[in-house]
Image (cartoon, rainbow, N blue to C red):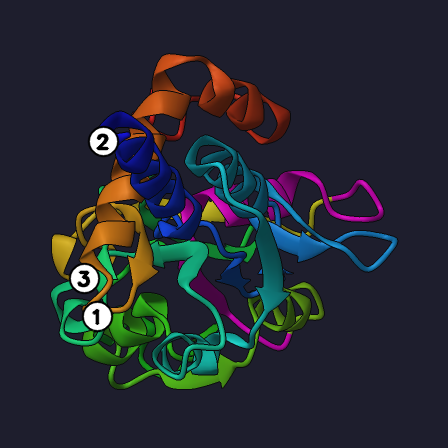
Amino acid sequence: MKKTLLALVLAATALTAVPAMAETLKIGTEGAYPPFNFQDSAGNLAGFDVEIGLALCEKLKVECEVVAQDWDGIIPGLQAKKYDMIIASMFITDERKKQVSFTDPYYLAAMTHAAAKGSGITDFTNEGMKGKTIGAQSGTTQADYVAAVYPDADIKLYPTQDEVNLDMANGRLDLEVGDMIPLLDWVTKNDDGKACCELIGQPITDPKYVGEGVGIAVRQEDNALREKLNAALKEIRADGTYQKINEKYFSIDIYTMK
């Protein structure tokens, strides 16, 4: 009788003990930053960030929904619980750590300059950029870099990187600063097959601006989720899932930049 009673108690406990991560989780991403996150021809969110996020959810054995959020509001959206994590190529910086917690990096990054082919720009000092029109996406570390390094330039900020690129292609900018990999993708794969622009100067790798790499942001109180994501990231690196996704978009392993 005691064994039967114990079995009933254990069964009831099992039924009522809902796993901590059994619910659907939401991933916030920008949806305007190809090839990392963008809307495909059917209007669905796609890209490297999105596929990595869904692969992590599969390891966590949870359903995940991906939602789009403008970059300027992406951290406030997380804090307002519109989604549970940000997977949107966000640099891990000390300033952002004051607002969110980050997982381990899921890829490394650098920034770069781009200009029209044959621009002749070689002086990347404030004096060399004086009077030139420089573009960057607002609310990014690229915008911070331009403001700090080129204070005497005419700085134009845009809601999305695509809008920066468009003004560069149309000759409205002398220079732009952006993440190296998306800009490399843009200058080699634009619509008409004739790249208007090229990457110039040395990669920008100052940790003040590129941080410790690119991480997944969660709310500061969600430490358990952060640790589970870290464990899942190690799994997809170990079993080849990460590499398969990487090879769809890039010719190098962006986790190691080799």
Per the image, label 3 sits on a secondary structure element best described as loop
Tell me the magenta residue range. Answer: 172-194
Q: What residue type is labelled 2?
A: Lys
Quarter in which the C terminus is drawn:
top left
Q: Residue furthest top?
A: 239
Residue under circle 3? 93
Per the image, label 2 sits on a secondary structure element best described as helix
Q: Residue at x 55, y 19 (%)?
A: 244
In screen coordinates, is 55 left or right of 78?
Answer: right
Per the image, label 1 sits on a secondary structure element best described as helix
Query: Could one spot residue 59 in this view of the protein?
Result: yes
Q: Which of marks 2 and 1 is in front?
A: 2
Q: Residue at x 51, y 70 (%)?
A: 174
Of labels 2 and 1, earlier in sequence is 2
Say whether marks 3 and 1 touch (CB < 8 Å).
Answer: yes
Residue 108 placement (x, y as % from top left): 30, 38
What is the CA distance from the residue labelled 2 to the residue labelled 1?
A: 56 Å
Residue under circle 1? 96
Q: Residue at x 42, y 37 (%)?
A: 60
In screen coordinates, is 151 left or right of 193?
Answer: left
Q: What residue type is labelled 1?
A: Arg
What is the CA distance from the residue labelled 3 to the residue labelled 1?
A: 5 Å
Residue 129 placement (x, y as % from top left): 32, 73
Residue under circle 2? 2
The answer to if 174 sits in the magenta stretch is yes
Q: Residues within 10 Å of mark 2 (few under 14, many from 20)?
A: few
